Amino acid sequence: MFPFVFFIFCFSKGITQDLIRVRNNLSQLCSPEFNGRGYVKKGDSLASAWIAQEFENIGLQKFQNSYFQNFNTSINTFPKEVSCSLDGKKLVLGKDFIVGADSPSAFGRAKVIFLDTLLFSDKNRRIQFFNQDFRKKAFVFPIHWTKKLAELNPTEIEKLEQAALWVSLHNKLTASVSTKQGKLPEIQVLQSAWKPNTKQITYKIRSKFIEKYPTRNVIGYLKGTIHSDTFVVFTAHYDHLGSMGNIYFPGANDNASGITMLLELAHYYKQKPSKYSVAFIAFAAEEAGLIGSQFYTQNPLFPLLQIKVLFNLDLVGTGDEGITVVNGVVFEKDFEILQKINEKYQLLPKIVKRGKAANSDHYFFSEKGVKAFFIYTLGGIKAYHDIDDKAETLPLTKYTEVFKLITEYIKICE
Ligand SMILES: [Zn+2]
C-alpha cells in the first residue's frame, strides 16, 4: 500500500521519514481511545499526553520544565444520548443527522412546519406562513435559505424562534464545536435522509456546557547548533471535534495528518540538527476558534520576534491537486522560493498562494508580525468534520513531497 520504493528513493540519504510510523501514529491519534481528541471523556488530555510522550521519546527539550501549556476554554458538549426520529423512523447519528454545535438540551415530539419559500415573493403566503403557531413545533428549512431567513423582519424572526426545534437540511453534514450554548435547539439533517411530507419529529438532545474546561498546548524544541536564539517553528493542532452521543469524529486529515508530520519533522531535526533552534507546537482548541494558538501568542515561551519562520500544518493528508500556502501573497519572496523548490524536485502538481486568512493556527502569529505560513493539501477526499475522516481512508498522497518542500525551504533559510 505504501509508496515505499519512492520513499527509499527520495530519502535514501539517511533522512528519516517513515511512512509506517506515520500510519501507526495516525491510527493512534484517530483511535476510539482518544475519542475524537475533544472534550468528552478527556479525549484532548489523552491525546496531548501521548504527544508529550512522543516528544520525550524523540528527545525534544522542554520550556520551563514541561511540555504543556495549560489554559481553560468554555465549551458546549454532547456526552450523553442524542436521538432523532422522523414519523417514528429512527435516524442514524453521524450519518443522517448531527446536533448544532451550540444547541442546548431539548427533548420531545414536535409537528413539522416546513419553510414555505414562496413567502419571500408572495405577500399573502408570507402572512399565511407567519399566522401559524410555532410554539412546540419543529421549524424545518434547507440550509441555503439561511441568508434569506436572516433578512426577515425582527417580529418574523422572533416567531420562528418560538419553535421548539430548528431542523436545517444539508447536502453534507459538517460538524463543529462551540464555546457557547445558544437558546435554540438545532438538529442538522442530511437532505437525502429527510422524507418530504414528514409530519412529526421526535428528538432528544442532552448537552453539557462547561464554563472552564482545562486543556493544554504541547510544546518542545531542539536547540540550534549556532543561532540558538533564533527559532524555526512548526505547528499543528491536535484537537478535533470530540464525540457526540455514541459517535466520535476521528479527525484523520483534520488534523492527525498535521500532528504526524510535526512528529516526523521532530525526528528529522533531531537527527539532522539545524543551526537555528526548532520548536514544535501541538495546539489545543483550534476547532473551538484558534483558542490554543491565540493563548500561546499572548503567552509565548520565547519572544515571538525571535521566530525566523513558522509553518502551520493543518489538513495535509491529500495533495492530488497540490497545496495552498496561506500568507503566500503576503510573503511573496518566500512563496517564490517554495515554487522554485517545487519545480526543481517536481513535488506537487501546483502550489496556490493565498492572502491572509484566520482559518488556522498561523493566524495570530502573522498578526503579531511573525512570518507564518499555513499549508494545506488539495483534492483527494471529501471527508471533513464528519465521521468519515478516518485514518484508514486518508491517502497521504503527497505527504512525503510536502515534507520535502518544507525541509528544503528551511535548508535555504539556513
Ligand atoms: Zn477542523
Image (tube, helix red, strand yellow):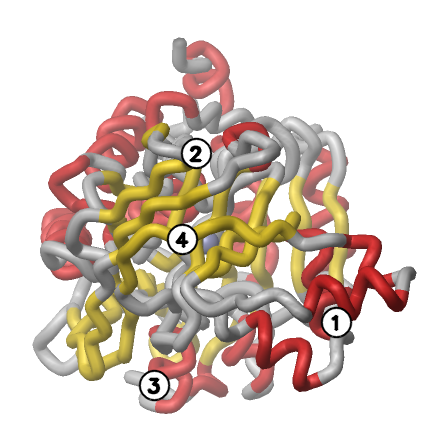
Q: Are marks 4 and 3 in contact (CB under 8 Å)?
A: no
**Mark 1 = which residue?**
330
Tell me where residue 117 appears, x and y as whole percent.
Answer: 78, 53
On the rendered structure, is 395 left or right of 243?
A: right
What is the distance, in whole Å, between disc 4 and disc 3 at their CAs?
50 Å
The residue carrying pointer 2 sits among few (fewer than 14), some (14 to 19) or many (20 or more) residues within 10 Å by Cα, namely: some
What residue type is disc 2 on? Asp
The residue carrying pointer 1 sits among few (fewer than 14), some (14 to 19) or many (20 or more) residues within 10 Å by Cα, namely: some
The residue carrying pointer 4 sits among few (fewer than 14), some (14 to 19) or many (20 or more) residues within 10 Å by Cα, namely: some
Q: Which mark is residue 110?
A: 4
| Marks 4 and 2, the one that precedes in the sequence | 2
What residue type is disc 1 on? Val
What residue type is disc 4 on? Ala
Q: Is residue 408 above or below residue 397?
A: below
Instruction: Indicate which label's residue lies in the foreground, 4 or 2.
Output: 4
Looking at the image, can residue 72 be seen? yes
Q: Which mark is residue 96?
A: 2
**Mark 3 = which residue?**
300
On the rendered structure, is 281 left or right of 11?
A: left
Q: Residue at x 26, y 52 (%)?
A: 204
Label 2 beta carbon within 8 A of ligand 1: no
Instruction: Indicate which label's residue lies in the foreground, 1 or 4.
Output: 4
